[in-house]
Image: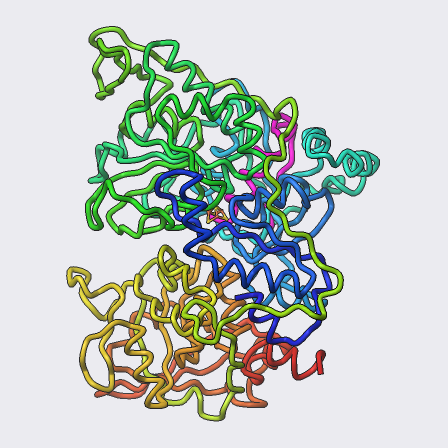
């Protein structure tokens, strides 16, 4: 979608170094080789488009199987002191290399690609002081961010950069720091960063960038660390003692439901979450480094020596990049994992983003999975709302894979060794017969040498004047974008309320992933998924249609939300969405803003927004507004119509509130005040119909 938007801007090529990564579409099913083959066949048209658009506009292109975007960036482009934006919310991953990485929507990326300045409100800075050190116990860098998520919640980092400091920083490898920064997206922070350390220098040298390490070394005490005394000027300071930090398991359904391992059994006993695990996964951009895989191997080897040769439940392992895969293969790690029963998936997102062709559990069947991923929203991995997903470190995932149960604590519990010496069976409290207890895995920060593996990178072309971009006008997967209409007077009068969202509404609820990813380049088709996972407050939760459905105000009939929105658009009726707290949290998925705009939406009025989604809505010419008084959310009833006063040309000003007039179908009109965060230039986006229209109307003319 970012490329389609860039194409519609009409520039000859990108003006800052840009790369495109094919990692999200690859379905995990049989294993790396077959899955990549299937992806290349299933998505031939999309990959041909990406490749041709990259060639045409001077962009580097990482083909399927080359790795997950953030891992490839870490291995090739991230450097201390740099700034990178990426159309994925886990772009802060680069903070593990002392680089400020910020996740943005596609239209923000298009601004940067077009050479325009990129902006965001100046964030606050939260300092996190790490004392003690990691390394000799079961805790890992994943536990730092899992604990922090529990402290700050999914919205606690909003408008903040998380900056780590303190002696504990020195005990971490570069990829371990990247794990923390990566998952900072789960607390909604703008970015996350570590100061430059020797470990970063070691990583740069190991990835053939010793020259950058030498340059960074020259500035390590001045430019690449926090200023002296900054500890006293952080907006807030949180301290975490790595010596006493417990391993954490977070979930289900939200990454900030944080359980120290010692309390997980209790949490399980107090809930109805399935204790038996159906599957386990190691991978994602968060935890798929060489160090992570080596820790998994270490535990597998311990179990094998004790006589437990196989994991108890499926263990799916995705190396983060082709380089990590090739290196782990060369070092024998992957062979040991295969022998233990693991399935090697391709170096891509796979089940982390719903691309999991799962046949062991039917949709709707209650089950639990555990992964080293970052995100565990409803249906995130397998589109099954009954899958309870827990996130933790790769080492705990491995221990759970051998136990097959979530109430296993490898620090205090042992696994029975059965007579056949090839399988284990853990049941809480069982001690009969020979047993085996894991030792904490030993950490190996870097391999002796990285093996780059197969080269799947397409370099940018310098003269592309004769090249063309492949888009078939009959395609159901790709569609050139038609610019949105500029703001028309009266857009925000007598808006119907399409639905009132209740509770958590992430971008996965607004524009679900999984099979829908096939239509990411076709706005019309992907719009058929709009809000189909959202809970509608107007329908009782016990009604199976309370998710994804709403009453059509024109016909009075219940239908899927996108179908109702289309019907309203057809009749020229404008509509708005009422949202709850932190509306649009999660990923930077701009489809979540493009779809409501495309289907005739004018405004989203919520208790609060996640940062990236709020900006995405503005960029697409919509009005993200927040209730001045949160209780006004409760007063909106089914059938209400809404009028916004103060949004017409010349009326709207930065910092000035907007009046909402609510007209119930029967009852008196009432008013409430709404806030917005538009500054004067962003108001121009609204008038032009989108930020891209504004850019075209002004700078690129
Ligand atoms: Fe991909 Fe999951 Fe990371 S979708 S980019 S592996 S968060």
227 in relation to 4, above or below: above
Image quadrant in which the C terminus is located: bottom right
Q: Is residue 55 above or below residue 129?
A: below
The front one of 659 and 639 is 639
Seen in the picture, residue 481 relative to 80 is either above or below; the reply is below
Instruction: Tell me what residue is drawn at x 52 percent, y 70 percent.
Output: 471
Q: Up-down: is 581 above or below 556?
A: above
Quadrant assignment, res 417: top left
Of 465 and 81, which appears nearest the observer?
465
Instruction: Please report the bounds of the magenta region as a residue range.
Output: 161-186
Q: What residue sits 38% from the left and 44% below the top? A: 28
Applied colour scheme: rainbow
Q: Is residue 651 visible?
A: yes
On whether residue 178 falls in the magenta region, the answer is yes
Of residues 228 and 586, the one nearer the viewer is: 586
Residue 164, by quadrant, is top right
- Spot occupied by residue 249 in the image (x, y as percentages of width and height): 38, 34
């Amino acid at each position: 979608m970012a490329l389609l938007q860039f194409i519609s801007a009409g520039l000859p090529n990108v003006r800052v170094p840009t790369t495109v990564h094919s990692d999200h579409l690859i379905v995990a099913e049989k294993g790396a080789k077959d899955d990549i083959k299937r992806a290349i066949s299933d998505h031939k048209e999309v990959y041909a488009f990406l490749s041709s658009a990259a060639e045409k506009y001077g962009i580097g292109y990482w083909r399927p199987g080359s790795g997950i975007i953030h891992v490839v960036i870490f291995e090739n482009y991230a450097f201390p002191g740099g700034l990178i934006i990426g159309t994925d919310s886990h772009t802060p991953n680069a903070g593990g290399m002392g680089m400020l990485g910020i996740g943005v929507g596609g239209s923000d990326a298009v601004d940067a690609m077009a050479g325009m300045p990129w902006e965001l409100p100046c964030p606050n800075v939260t300092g996190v002081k790490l004392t003690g050190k990691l390394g000799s116990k079961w805790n890992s860098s994943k536990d730092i961010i899992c604990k922090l998520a529990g402290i700050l919640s999914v919205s606690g980092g909003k408008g903040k950069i998380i900056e780590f400091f303190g002696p504990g920083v020195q005990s971490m490898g570069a990829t371990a720091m990247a794990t923390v920064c990566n998952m900072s997206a789960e607390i909604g922070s703008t970015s996350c960063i570590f100061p430059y350390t020797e470990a970063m220098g070691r990583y740069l040298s190991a990835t053939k960038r010793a020259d950058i390490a030498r340059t960074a070394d020259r500035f390590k005490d001045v430019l690449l660390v926090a200023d002296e005394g900054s500890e006293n000027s952080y907006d807030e300071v949180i301290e975490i003692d790595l010596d006493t930090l417990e391993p954490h398991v977070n979930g289900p359904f939200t990454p900030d439901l944080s359980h120290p391992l010692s309390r997980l059994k209790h949490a399980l006993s107090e809930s109805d979450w399935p204790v038996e695990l159906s599957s386990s996964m190691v991978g994602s951009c968060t935890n798929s480094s060489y160090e992570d895989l080596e820790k998994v191997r270490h535990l597998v080897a311990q179990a094998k020596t004790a006589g437990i040769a196989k994991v108890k439940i499926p263990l799916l392992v995705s190396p983060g990049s082709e380089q990590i895969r090739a290196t782990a293969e060369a070092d024998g790690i992957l062979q040991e994992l295969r022998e233990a029963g693991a399935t090697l998936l391709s170096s891509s997102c796979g089940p982390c983003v719903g691309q999991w062709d799962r046949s062991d559990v039917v949709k709707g069947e209650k089950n639990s999975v555990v992964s080293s991923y970052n995100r565990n929203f409803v249906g995130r991995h397998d589109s099954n709302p009954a899958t309870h997903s827990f996130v933790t470190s790769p080492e705990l995932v491995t221990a759970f894979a051998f136990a097959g149960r979530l109430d296993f604590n490898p620090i205090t519990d042992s696994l029975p060794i059965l007579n056949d010496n090839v399988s284990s069976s853990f049941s809480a409290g069982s001690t009969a017969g020979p047993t085996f207890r894991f030792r904490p895995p030993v950490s190996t920060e870097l391999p002796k040498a990285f093996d780059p593996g197969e080269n799947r990178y397409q370099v940018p072309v310098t003269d592309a004047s004769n090249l063309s971009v492949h888009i078939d006008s009959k395609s159901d997967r790709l569609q050139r974008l038609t610019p949105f209409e500029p703001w028309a007077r009266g857009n925000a009068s007598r808006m119907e309320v399409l639905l009132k969202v209740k509770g958590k509404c992430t971008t996965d609820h607004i524009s679900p992933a999984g099979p829908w990813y096939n239509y990411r380049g076709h706005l019309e088709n992907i719009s058929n998924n709009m809000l189909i996972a959202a809970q509608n407050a107007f329908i009782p939760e016990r009604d199976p249609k309370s998710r994804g459905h709403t009453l059509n105000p024109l016909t009075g009939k219940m239908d899927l939300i996108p179908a109702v929105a289309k019907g309203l658009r057809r009749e020229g009726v404008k509509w708005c969405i009422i949202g709850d707290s932190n509306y649009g949290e999660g990923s930077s998925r701009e489809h979540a803003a493009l779809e409501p705009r495309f289907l005739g939406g004018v405004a989203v009025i919520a208790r609060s927004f996640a940062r990236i989604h709020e900006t995405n809505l503005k960029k697409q010419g919509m009005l993200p507004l927040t209730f001045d008084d949160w209780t006004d959310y409760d007063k909106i009833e089914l059938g209400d119509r809404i009028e916004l006063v103060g949004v017409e040309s010349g009326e709207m000003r930065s910092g000035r509130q907007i009046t909402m007039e609510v007209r119930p179908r029967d009852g008196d009109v009432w008013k409430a005040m709404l806030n917005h965060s538009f500054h004067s230039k962003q108001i121009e986006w609204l008038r032009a119909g989108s930020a891209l229209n504004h850019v075209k109307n002004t700078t690129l003319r």
